[in-house]
Image: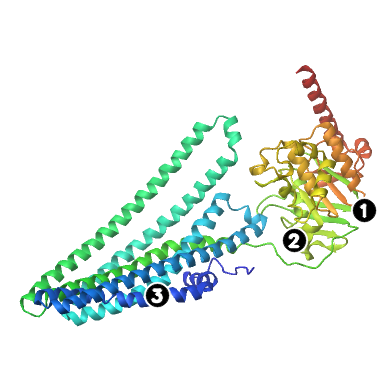
Amino acid sequence: MERSKMNINKTDREKLKWFFKKYIYIGKTHLILIIGLIFIGSLVANISPYLYGKILDSITLGDMDFLIKLIIIYFFIIIFTNLLSMLEGYVGKVVNFRLSKNAQIELFDKIIRMRTLAYNKYEVGELISRLNGDTDSIVSFGINLITNTLHIVINMIVSLYFVIVISIRLSSVAIFYIPMTFLVTYFARKYFKELTEQRKKFSDKYFSFQNEMFSNNTGIKSFQLENKINDKYKSFIENEFNLLKRSIHLGNIIQLANSLIITISSLYIIYLSALLINDGILTIGLMVSFNTYINKLFSSISQVFSINISLQEVMVSLNRIIEVMSEESEDSNELIFEKYNDPTLKCVDMIFSYGDEKENVLRDMTINIDKFGLYSIVGSNGCGKSTFAKLLIKLYDIRSGNIFINGLDYFEFSYNFIRSNITYVQKEEFFFNDTIINNIRLASEFLKEEDIEMMCKKVGVDEFIKTLPEGYRTIIGEGGYTLSSGQKQKLSIARALLRDTPIYIFDEVTANLDGKAEKDIMRIMKEYSKSSIILFISHKISSIMDSHKIFVFDDGRVMDSGSHDYLIKNNQMYNELFKNREISIQLKGVEKIGG
């Protein structure tokens, strides 16, 4: 899919040109059809006022034969224009939907491929607001601009022609109307843009708040925060109401100013028309026709200025979309590499921080793994264990240093290649609101059901699944909320192992497992470590004691490495971690006996 190169610092005109070329012109075939319908419909519709004036004059003159002909023609013109309008409306809505969804698909694709550091700058609600609200606003504006411009141009040309033909003296009212309407629009557009920016920022916070509250419902209940959250929600509603009132006030002021201008113009037309009719220069029918055409002309002029105001609002949405589209994406190049069968992993002097101004999380990190085996990483909270794992799968880029896979520079490989060779299972299990089997098939859509069942038996979750009414086709709810923490960890491990990659990284995946389940999982890990590199991050000593090598992390560095027995004898920090863990286990045992 084509990536956006638009810069947020470009001019508004360049941004609009980019957006029209990228998202509007792709529907040019349907847009040409709409334009054709509008052109025909507008031309025919603009004959109606003139015919209506002639009908009135025929009534005044008593020419009934001519009157009947005019009424028949007028009737068919109205029917024809209404049919064209219905067809135009249908095609317009279809085109609007398709183009809007195309823009949303591209923006959605951009968001899910965005570099992790860039993605973390946005709140979830903010991205949802931009994806759904801003894309719709801009596409609708773009289509309306094309169609309304044609309407406006035709109406202005035809109306101006009939206004001048009917009475040049009456048309002088435009000299007053046009500059006054321009002044109202000129002063209003700045306030509309500021108000739109405030409303968009409010929407971002509002959607983020809702997402956060619904995602943490259990925590809200357990800490009895319902009343506090309700009060905060009410404050959001109050802020929304205040923004609405400001919008209404601004709209009312503009409407009042425009109404005053139109009223003065209309009174002038009535007064001058009366003089011209009295002098026999103008008829009642022509006066009605003139009034209709001048109102069409005024309406077209007002629409031009309204488009200018709408443009200020739309530019806010366009800037928000361009900001996201300008973020760095992960490359999606499908480089031709086979999975490594005999991998090695080496990290040399790695330095990393979550931003240029922030303190380094990893400092001169060096690790060398030159053969298959079970390797573990231990250390206190915040020492960089999970950060190290995320760097290995290219969620972030290191600031300096090198990573080598099989002796080749890590940075020469695409994201796809790295992630097809390294499977990372994070602490927080992820599951979709789908069946168990479909969640496991996220590893590979081609997995056979018997292979899935066999792996689930290995990790000790198959028996539980088969007790469910729908078995492997049971829908587990959003985030897998119907499953226990231990069951989710077992399924995560099964899904990961089914990917069959040469390198695995497991981050605290046995934290919620009981002693027996943990032993079963570690037995499987040892089995797979005969043909893979398995990196195991854990605080549980029982999970790491049999590792081929244990890396001790502290303050973003590898302080020491070796077997469990070696570290117990030679590394004070590891010794302390081990003792603290043993004391914790003993205390839990006492609690269970006393409980």
Name the secondary structure under disc 2: helix
In the image, what residue occupies the spot 31% across and 70% down? 79
Q: Position of residue 317 (x, y in %)?
A: 48, 60
How far, Cα to Cα, is label 1 from label 3? 71 Å
Name the quadrant of the N terminus: bottom right
Q: Is residue 354 left or right of residue 232?
A: right
How far apart, in angstroms, are the residues tagged by discs 2 and 3? 49 Å
Residue 371's disc is 1
Residue at coordinates 80% horizontally, 48% vertically from top-left? Answer: 452
Question: Is residue 1 left or right of 573 when viewed as pictured?
Answer: left
Instruction: Classify residue 175 as left or right of residue 44.
Output: left
Check disc 3 and give the amino acid type.
Leu
Give SS at disc 1: loop
List the residue tagged with mark 3: 37
In the picture as drawn, the residue positioned furthest to the top comes out as 594
Q: Which residue is mark 2?
A: 415
Crowding near the residue tagged with mark 3, few <14, some 14–19, many ≥20 C-alpha atoms within 10 Å = some
